[in-house]
């Protein structure tokens, strides 16, 4: 009798587990359909990044999810010259554009100038008037510097939405290249910097901040401290800001442009 009860219990457990796993698998593979907003999304890699930084995400958006179309890759030379591969059309579904700095360890000021050059090109050559922006690591710093300096320039397109993936936003992160500077009176300087930047950023920009916490005691994604990522909430007090923190061993700095959960978060923010 006990043996029969045990067999029955194990059978029910196995069936229940199978149903649960099947449900989870279907949820993981569930596709979402997004409309064609006809607004290009422009990606910028981080410090020492390259065309492969966002290559995987862009390919997934096009080939796996069918959310957008891989359109242009823009290379900006160390001299600021623009070259492109691919094709952009207003008929493409949610066009995806990848900006590559051939000198990927240049200063933030230099990268913001190159970003402006690329955006001037896109408005003049492709007649793009508005766009979404995505930046990983220092790429988000380049977007911030660009917005603070050039966004009100009528010769460049307007940004509607911007996404920061593991972006260090403390100003001292960019003084010495990859090595953060040590500042005195840090809190005072952070407050002053935030006040200055917040006045320069357009109020109608929607912001999504995504960071990683490995939960190993570092409060970071292994490269960027979470406090520096979330400092963005002080930089954008007048904008609509959403935050998402990925936690656990998968929340590494480079994984922030590779995880499917982040793909879906981006799609929900930009396209739905």
Image (cartoon, rainbow, N blue to C red):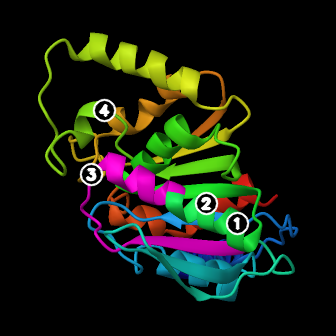
Q: Quadrant of residue 130?
A: bottom right
Mark whose residue sits in front, 1 or 3: 1
Q: Is residue 270 left or right of residue 91?
A: left
Residue 55 versus residue 253: which sits nearer the camera? 55
Q: Does the magenta portion include 115?
A: yes
Residue matched to label 4: 171
Q: Residue at x 67, y 56 (%)?
A: 132
Which comes before the other along the chain, label 3 or label 2?
3
Kindly check if marks 1 and 3 are in contact, taking CB atoms under 8 A apart as contact: no
Query: Tags 4 and 3 in contact by the CB under 8 Å rule?
Result: no
Q: Nearer the viewer, mark 4 or mark 1?
A: 1
Camera-nearest label, 2 or 4: 2
Which label is found at residue 107? 3
Which residue carries the number 2 mark?
Answer: 120
Q: Residue 124 has which mark? A: 1
Which residue is at a point 63% across and 34% down the rendered structure image? 241
Of the two numbered discs 4 and 3 in the rendering, the one whose residue sits closer to the viewer = 3
Q: Do the residues under discs 1 and 2 have CB atoms within 8 angstroms? A: yes
Range drawn in magenta: 95-116
Circle 1: is it few (<14), some (14-19), or many (20+) Cα within 10 Å? few
Q: Residue at x 78, y 61 (%)?
A: 271
Quadrant into which the N terminus falls: bottom right
């Amino acid at each position: 009798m006990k043996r029969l009860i045990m067999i029955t219990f194990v059978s029910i457990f196995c069936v229940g587990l199978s149903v649960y796993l099947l449900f989870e698998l279907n949820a993981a593979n569930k596709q979402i359909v997004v409309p064609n907003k006809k607004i290009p999304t422009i990606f910028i890699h981080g410090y020492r990044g390259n065309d492969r930084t966002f290559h995987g995400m862009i390919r997934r958006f096009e080939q796996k999810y069918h959310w957008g179309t891989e359109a242009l890759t823009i290379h900006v030379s160390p001299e600021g010259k623009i070259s492109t591969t691919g094709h952009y059309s207003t008929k493409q579904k949610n066009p995806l554009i990848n900006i590559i700095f051939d000198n990927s360890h240049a200063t933030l000021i230099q990268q913001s100038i190159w970003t402006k050059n690329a955006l001037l090109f896109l408005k003049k050559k492709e007649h793009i008037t508005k766009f979404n922006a995505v930046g990983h690591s220092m790429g988000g710093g380049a977007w911030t510097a660009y917005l603070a300096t050039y966004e009100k320039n009528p010769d460049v397109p307007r940004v509607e939405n911007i996404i920061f993936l593991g972006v260090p936003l403390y100003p001292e992160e960019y003084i010495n290249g990859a090595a953060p500077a040590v500042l005195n009176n840090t809190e005072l300087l952070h407050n002053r910097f935030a006040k200055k930047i917040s006045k320069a950023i357009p109020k109608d920009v929607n912001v999504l901040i995504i960071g990683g916490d490995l939960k190993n005691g570092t409060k970071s994604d292994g490269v960027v401290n979470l406090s520096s990522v979330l400092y963005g909430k002080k930089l954008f007090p007048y904008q609509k800001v959403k935050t998402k923190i990925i936690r656990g061993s998968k929340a590494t700095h480079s994984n922030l442009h590779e995880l499917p959960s982040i793909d879906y978060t981006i799609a929900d923010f930009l396209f739905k």
